[in-house]
Amino acid sequence: AGGVHSPSPSGSSQADLLRPLRLPTILVGSSVLGGISSTRASFESLRMRGYDIDVVLMFTSPYYGNDTYLAQYFAHGEHKINICLMDK
């Protein structure tokens, strides 16, 4: 549980610990206030470490609209990553 930089048992970041396994990667986006920034920061951090993000999963957010923004952000440009939205 936690973010991409939550500490592992050895004290290193989860992102660094799991990288050698080359596992399929699902990024869970945030639908709350500040969620666009935290989702993009997590995405960029994973990409810098060589992760291939297979899909972004998140709840819809009619109040903040994070899902709308992030769906466009990940679908266009160089990313072309699917986003899976779920109703709360």
Image (cartoon, helix red, strand yellow):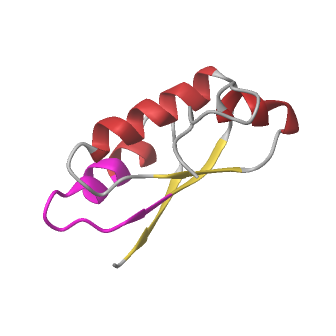
Q: Toward which corner of the image does residue 37 lie, by quadrant?
A: top left
Can residue 55 be seen here?
yes
Q: Is residue 19 above or below residue 80?
A: above
Q: Observer-nearest residue: 59 or 7? A: 7
State the residue lying farthest toward the top. Answer: 48
Quadrant where the C terminus is found in the figure: bottom left
Range drawn in magenta: 57-71
- In this rendering, is residue 31 above or below 17? below
Q: Is residue 76 visible?
A: no
Q: Which residue lies at the image location 75% right of the left edge and 50% below the top edge?
A: 24
Q: Where residue 50 sits: x, y (%)?
A: 70, 26
As drawn, which residue projects farthest toward the right? Answer: 21
Foreground residue, 60 or 33?
33
Q: Quadrant of residue 58?
A: bottom left
Estimate the x, y position of residue 8 in percent, counting from the top left.
Answer: 70, 35
**Residue 63 is covered by the magenta coloring:** yes
Q: Residue furthest left?
A: 63
In the visual, does 57 lie left or right of 64?
right
Residue at the location (42% across, 52% down)? 29
Q: Position of residue 77 (x, y in %)?
A: 43, 35
How many numbered discs? Answer: 0
| Spot occupied by residue 65 in the image (x, y as percentages of width and height) | 19, 58
In the figure, is residue 55 to the left or right of 40? right
Which residue occupies 31% across, 68% down?
A: 60
The answer to if 19 sits in the magenta stretch is no
Left-right relation of 88 to 74? left
Image vertical order of residue 11 relative to residue 3, above or below: above
